[in-house]
Image (cartoon, rainbow, N blue to C red):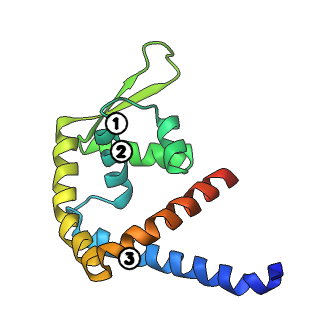
């Protein structure tokens, strides 16, 4: 098979992924607590999982966004009281971000809100199908991360 003969397959794959991403984001946005955006939830969820501080630059790298976009998200989270941002004691040019108790509570509320929707989708697909596709999606993600 030549590269050209694979092109329709590649286009179909990315078309499905992009459409699924958009539909999932729309559904998540509708069930997240009022005022919380997907980017907010993602950062809170990450910080809650790590249980440690990260710099804005580290967070930007983790989420593959610009530092400006991460700064915007962090400013909104700080304004809401969901994160604490402090100067780095070792390097005054840097800041460090930690999730606050209110942020943990907001993250937990968001998880509780999205869990029924996620469980419904997985239930409709079937656990076997999800287990089958996860390694493929993980491999695709890892390959795309190498491109950056």
Question: Is residue 11 in sight in this rendering?
Answer: yes
Q: Position of residue 122 (x, y in %)?
A: 29, 74
Circle 1 SS class: helix
Which disc number belongs to residue 50? 1
Circle 3 SS class: helix
Q: Position of residue 99 (x, y in %)?
A: 28, 36
Q: Residue at x 31, y 41 (%)?
A: 49
Circle 2 SS class: helix
* Apparent side of residue 3 relative to residue 54 in the rendered image (left or right): right
* Apparent side of residue 134 relative to residue 98 in the rendered image (left or right): right
Q: How many marks?
A: 3
How many residues crowd around disc 3 within 10 Å: few (fewer than 14), some, or many (20 or more)?
A: few
Question: Is residue 78 in sight in this rendering?
Answer: no
First-in-chain label (3 vs 2): 2
First-in-chain label (1 vs 3): 1
Query: Which residue is under mark 3?
Result: 129
Query: Which residue is under mark 2?
Result: 46
Which disc number belongs to residue 92? none
């Amino acid at each position: 098979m030549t590269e050209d003969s694979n092109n329709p397959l590649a286009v179909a794959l990315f078309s499905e992924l992009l459409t699924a991403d958009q539909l999932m984001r729309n559904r998540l946005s509708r069930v997240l607590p009022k005022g919380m955006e997907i980017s907010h939830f993602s950062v809170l969820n990450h910080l809650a999982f790590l249980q440690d501080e990260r710099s804005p630059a580290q967070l930007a790298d983790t989420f593959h966004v610009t530092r400006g976009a991460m700064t915007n998200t962090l400013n909104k989270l700080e304004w809401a009281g969901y994160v604490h941002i402090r100067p780095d004691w070792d390097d005054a040019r840097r800041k460090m971000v930690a999730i606050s108790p209110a942020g943990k509570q907001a993250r937990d509320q968001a998880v509780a809100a999205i869990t029924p929707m996620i469980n419904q989708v997985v239930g409709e697909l079937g656990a076997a199908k999800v287990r089958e596709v996860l390694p493929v999606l993980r491999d695709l993600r890892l390959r795309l991360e190498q491109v950056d």
